[in-house]
Image: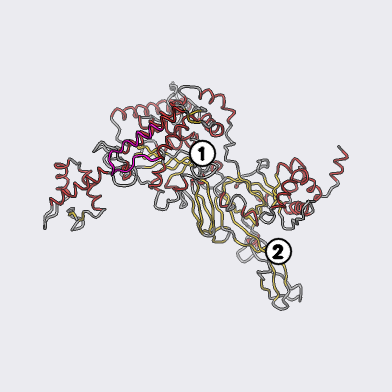
């Protein structure tokens, strides 16, 4: 053993890398030789090199340029059965196994200058590919000689004198004879969970050559928004230290040698620590009821909120994605849910609680979302000293593989959200092709969209779609859409008041007691969870990775009968179809999600019953209180039949009231509609506004309040 060690110690650094390649990388080098026309990098794992020779790793971290040179020389002389020259190949030390000690962006200090660092963060900007001058060929304008000068990244170095005639130029760059590299600029910012506030620190990263195209069909743009560890040499911009405006300060940047993409599998959740507890819960007949109670235990849940809490359990667990080997027919597993409610009904509180429990989530307010919004955008901005186009992912790509919560979604939905079609359905992908940047950003996330009704409260006589500011594409893809009105009955108001006052009293007594006051606090029980947030989070992760329930024959029959019964609601050939296969798919997703919540291997009838009950409530938005009949246009596209008939009746009544030289006033119209048609003042005024917007009514004198039918 000692002789073997002595033999190894006598090797040069290049020879040590050769031996490492034989032990760890022989197959990878053979594959690189076969694909060398397209790929030029050999990636070696930090963990493998550490186990082989810790000193090599330590030297690489402290002297990256020198050690990389040794490693690439060893690759060039490596003995292969095929005749391939690796003259331009790169050796990149990466860390896909999370073995290296990584640091956050703010943790980088001046002590790291020149060292090889591993920095974790979120990839938040990716520019298009540009061409960087690597080895410039300067042509002497006196004798025509070419003078090759290696170029720094941030500036251009010219020769002092010509190697041919030994005179000081002048020189001109010969672009055809120069050597160039592809280059992208990246911005890596702090991970959301590691920030002290909403303002994330960031670092500029440069990637060269084939690393520009690493990570997907379109290269790094496909990975924009993902969590990464950037491994490379930390440098400062030396140009800031010279010149007219120079001082002794310089900004830092990373020359990336490798980028490792962090796992999306919630590795930070300790499932085993909570497994006994959630396995016992899964066998409890009241499992889902206890999960509901544990979401926001301090909030009084009336009937509407209780229904939303139940749906939220399904939303946390989700179904699972089913993809055929060939052809179409992808079945998404992520549940999309909408809650539109009057202010003060607890939407934000629920959103915060779900954000705490979900293993991976993004929670944003529509008013706080950047101009990038939901999907993605190419933006032109000052970046690393130049104005360039870069790709910036929205909140949906950032939450890929988890949950996405948007409060006040009505502030971000507009005519520019057509990409929602692909982002929330089918492949669940945002496709970007603009400003020389192409990317396919995955958006496989469960969306919870929350917002307010336009007028602060709901009018049950008006179609729901006319009272919410949501894009049709979004509404069409919501598996569940709930409404919360502020107009509660007196008894419910009393229950809410009792709950809030009692909760405050119990908690304030406890706080006063802890602060030394002479009080005897009662034991607060209104905020206790049946299931802790940590246990519920671990249960979600376990279900996501291990539970894939299938439908029983009885459950399949229940779902089929439900779908057919909804189809039968349509009793008028002119009405839109009340339910599409998308509604049936939503019922399946919900059923599977409830089965997952109980860690069940099969979807039982009890799971389908919960799903059907929630689906019926959603479909209930389509019942017209005027006619008592079903009309899917109340939430979908088109004008509801009752609204069409009301508009027609009001227009005809106004025609009867008007004369050649007389136009009825809105007050007269309201009185007449109440007596002849039984319409309330608000309903009449809203109908007059609708008719005016459609050009069927107009005011001969603007602002007079007098109307005339066209």
Q: Which secondary structure lies at badge 1?
A: loop
Name the residue rendered at 80%, 51% in the picture.
79
Marks 1 and 2 close (CB-CB < 8 Å): no
Q: Note whether 295 is above or below 473 in the view shown.
A: above
Q: Is residue 337 magenta?
A: no
The local crowd at label 1, few if under 14, some if 14 to 19, many if 20 or more residues have their Cα within 10 Å, is some
Q: Secondary structure at mark 2?
A: strand
Query: Looking at this view, is 652 or 168 the one in front?
Result: 652
- Please state, as top left, top right, bottom left or bottom right, where the N terminus lies in the image: top right
- Picture disc at residue 510: none
Q: Which mark is residue 150?
A: 2
Residue 339 percent across, percent down from the top left: 39, 39
Dot placed on the residue nearer the N-terminal end, 1 or 2: 2
Q: Is residue 380 above or below residue 278?
A: below
Residue 489, horizontal then vertical, whole percent: 28, 31
Front-most of residues 654 and 414: 654
Q: Position of residue 384 (x, y in %)?
A: 58, 58
What range of the chain is rendered magenta? 560-580
Residue where numbered disc 1 is placed: 321
């Amino acid at each position: 053993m000692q002789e073997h060690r002595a033999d190894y110690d006598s090797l040069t650094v290049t020879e040590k890398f050769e031996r490492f390649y034989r032990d760890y990388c022989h197959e990878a080098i053979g594959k690189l030789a076969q694909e060398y026309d397209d790929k030029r990098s050999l990636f070696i794992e930090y963990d493998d090199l550490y186990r082989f020779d810790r000193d090599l790793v330590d030297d690489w971290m402290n002297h990256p340029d020198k050690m990389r040179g040794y490693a690439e020389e060893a690759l060039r002389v490596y003995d292969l059965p095929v005749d391939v020259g690796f003259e331009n190949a790169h050796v990149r030390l990466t860390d896909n196994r999370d073995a290296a000690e990584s640091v956050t962006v703010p943790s980088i200090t001046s002590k790291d200058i020149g060292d090889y660092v591993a920095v974790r963060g979120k990839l938040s900007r990716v520019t298009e590919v540009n061409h960087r001058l690597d080895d410039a060929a300067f042509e002497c304008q006196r004798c025509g000689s070419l003078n090759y000068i290696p170029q720094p990244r941030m500036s251009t170095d010219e020769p002092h004198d010509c190697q041919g005639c030994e005179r000081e130029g002048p020189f001109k760059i010969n672009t055809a004879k120069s050597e160039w590299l592809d280059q992208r600029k990246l911005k890596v910012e702090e991970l959301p969970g590691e920030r002290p506030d909403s303002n994330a620190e960031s670092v500029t990263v440069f990637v060269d050559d084939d690393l520009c195209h690493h990570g997907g069909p379109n290269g790094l743009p496909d990975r924009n928004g993902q969590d990464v560890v950037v491994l490379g040499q930390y440098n400062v911009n030396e140009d800031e230290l010279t010149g007219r405006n120079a001082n002794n300060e310089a900004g830092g940047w990373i020359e990336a040698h490798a980028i490792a993409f962090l796992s999306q599998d919630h590795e930070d959740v300790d499932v085993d620590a909570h497994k006994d507890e959630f396995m016992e819960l899964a066998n409890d007949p009241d499992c889902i009821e206890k999960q509901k109670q544990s979401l926001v235990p301090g909030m009084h849940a009336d009937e509407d909120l209780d229904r939303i809490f139940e749906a939220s359990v399904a939303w946390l667990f989700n179904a699972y994605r089913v993809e055929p080997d060939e052809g179409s027919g992808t079945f998404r597993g992520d549940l999309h849910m909408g809650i539109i409610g009057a202010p003060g009904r607890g939407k934000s509180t629920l959103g915060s609680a779900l954000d705490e429990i979900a293993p991976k989530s993004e929670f944003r307010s529509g008013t706080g979302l950047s101009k990038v919004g939901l999907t993605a955008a190419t933006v032109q901005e000052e970046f690393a000293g130049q104005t360039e186009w870069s790709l910036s992912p929205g909140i949906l790509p950032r939450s890929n593989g988890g949950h996405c919560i948007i409060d006040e979604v009505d502030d971000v939905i507009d005519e520019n959200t057509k990409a929602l079609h692909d982002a929330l359905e089918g492949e669940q992908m945002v496709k970007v092709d603009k400003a020389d940047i192409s990317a396919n950003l995955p958006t496989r996330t469960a969306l919870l969209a929350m917002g307010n009704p336009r007028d602060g409260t709901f009018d049950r006589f008006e179609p729901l779609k006319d009272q919410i500011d949501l894009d049709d594409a979004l509404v069409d893809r919501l598996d569940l859409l709930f409404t919360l009105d502020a107009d509660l009955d007196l008894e419910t108001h009393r229950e809410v008041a009792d709950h809030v006052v009692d909760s405050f009293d119990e908690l304030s007594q406890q706080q006063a007691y802890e602060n030394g006051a002479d009080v005897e606090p009662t034991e607060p029980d209104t905020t206790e969870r049946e299931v802790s947030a940590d246990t519920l989070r671990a249960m979600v992760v376990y279900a996501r990775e291990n539970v894939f329930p299938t439908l029983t024959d009885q459950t399949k029959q229940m779902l089929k009968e439900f779908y057919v019964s909804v189809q039968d609601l349509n009793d008028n050939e002119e009405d839109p179809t009340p339910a599409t296969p998308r509604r049936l798919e939503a019922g399946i997703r919900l059923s599977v999600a409830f089965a997952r919540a109980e860690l069940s291997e099969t979807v039982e009838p009890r799971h389908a019953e919960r799903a059907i009950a929630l689906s019926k409530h959603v479909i209930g938005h389509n019942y017209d209180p005027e006619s008592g009949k079903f009309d899917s246009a109340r939430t979908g596209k088109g004008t509801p039949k009752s609204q069409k008939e009301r508009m027609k009746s009001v227009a005809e009544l106004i025609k009867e009231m008007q004369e050649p030289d007389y136009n009825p006033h809105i007050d007269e119209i309201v009185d007449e509609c109440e007596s002849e048609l039984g319409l309330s003042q608000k309903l009449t005024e809203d109908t007059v506004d609708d008719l005016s917007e459609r050009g069927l009514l107009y005011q001969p004198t603007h602002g007079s309040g007098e109307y005339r039918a066209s």
